[in-house]
Amino acid sequence: MVTPRLKDVAALAGVSVKTVSNVINDYPFVREETRVRVQLAIDKLRYRPNLSARRLRTGRSGLIALSLPEISTPYFGEIAGLIVDVAEQRGWTVLIDQTGGERSHEQRTAAGIRADLIDGSIASPLSMTAADIAALDPHHPVVLLGEQLAMVAADHIAIDNVRAARETTEHLISLGCRRIAVIGARPRHNGTANLRLEGYRLALDDAGLRPVRSLVAPASDFHLADGYAAMQALLRTRRPPDAVFCFNDLLAFGALRAVAEAGLAVPGDIKICGFDDIELCRYSSPTLTSVSPDKRAIAETAVDLLARRITGAETGPGQDIVVPHTLEVRDSTAPAGQRR
C-alpha cells in the first residue's frame, strides 16, 4: 500500500500543498470551509504527518500529552476518548499517561513527559500544588482539568461543582427528602469533594435543614467498593437516610448494590444521585440520576486553548473557564409515574 503524501491530500481537496500544511499546523487564518475539505481528504486517505519533518519545518511535533489519574475510571476514559477525537481533527497525536494521582508522576507529565518532543500538555492533577505548577517551564503550554488547582495562574477548565451539588441536593429536597446523606467526603483533601460538600450544605441551609454529621459518609477513594461500604454504614445508623447524593457515579453504583442487598427499593425507600453521568447511568437498574458535565465542551475547550497557546495566538494570563452542566433525572429519583 502506497503511503499518502501531502500533495495527495492537496490534490483530493483541490487546494495547494501550503494550504494543507496550514490546516495540519492549525494556522488560524484558514477558512472553515477549506479546513473541513482538507480534513475530509486527510481522513479519506488516512494521511499521517511525518512528525520528524514537521518538527524540523515548524518547531512542533504534533504530539501532546494527556495526564489522567486513572484511565480505567469511566469518567476519565470518556474524557480521554473525546480529547483524542478532538485532537485528531487537528492532526495531533495524543500520548496518554496514567499518574495514579502521585505528585511526582503528575509533575513529570505536566512538564510534557519528553518536553523536547511534546508541544503541550493537558493534565488532570490530584496531588500537584500551586507551587508545582508555578515551577513548570513557562514555555511549555499546559491546560489543567478539574478543581484541584482552581486558584493557580494557569489555564484551567472545570464545571461549577458547588452549584451542581447544590442543585442536586435541591432536587432531592423538592421530592420531600429530609435526611439526605452524602457519600464521598474527603476531609483531608482539597478540591472536588470539598466543593461538592459545600454545595450540599448550602442547599440544606437554604431549606432550613440541619446538617447531620452521621449522614456525611467519607470515602477513601471514589470506587465501587467505597460506595458499597459507605452505604452499608449509613443503613446501620439509628435513622438511615431517605436519599443519598454520591460524589461520583461509581460510588452511586456501589450504594445501589448495598441498598438492594438490604432488601430496600430505589427510589421507593431511598433515592440515589450520582455525579459525572457516565454511560452506565443510562443502563443501570434503576437508571441513575446524575450530574452531567458537558464532557464534549471540556475536551473541545481544552484542545482549543492548548492550540492557541502552542501557536502563540493566546499569550495572556491563564484563563479560568467554567463549562456547563445539567442534572439528568432518571429512575433512581424520579417520582412514580415519571420513571423512564
Image: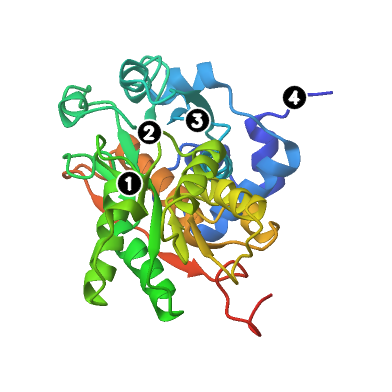
In the rendered view, how is the structure colored?
A: rainbow
Q: Label 4 vs label 2: CA separation?
A: 33 Å
Q: Earlier in the sequence, mark 2 or mark 1?
A: 2
Disc 2: which residue? 123
Looking at the rendered structure, the kind of residue marked 4 is: Thr
In this rendering, the label closer to the viewer, 2 or 3: 3
Q: Label 2 vs label 1: CA separation?
A: 19 Å
Q: Label 2 vs label 3: CA separation?
A: 12 Å
**Residue at 59%, 61% in the rendered image:** 288
The disc placed on residue 70 is: 3
Disc 4: which residue? 3
In this rendering, the label closer to the viewer, 4 or 2: 2
Looking at the figure, which quarter contains the N terminus? top right
Q: Earlier in the sequence, mark 4 or mark 2?
A: 4
**Residue at 44%, 17% in the rendered image:** 56
Q: Nearer the viewer, residue 164 or 84?
A: 164
Looking at the rendered structure, the kind of residue marked 1 is: Ala
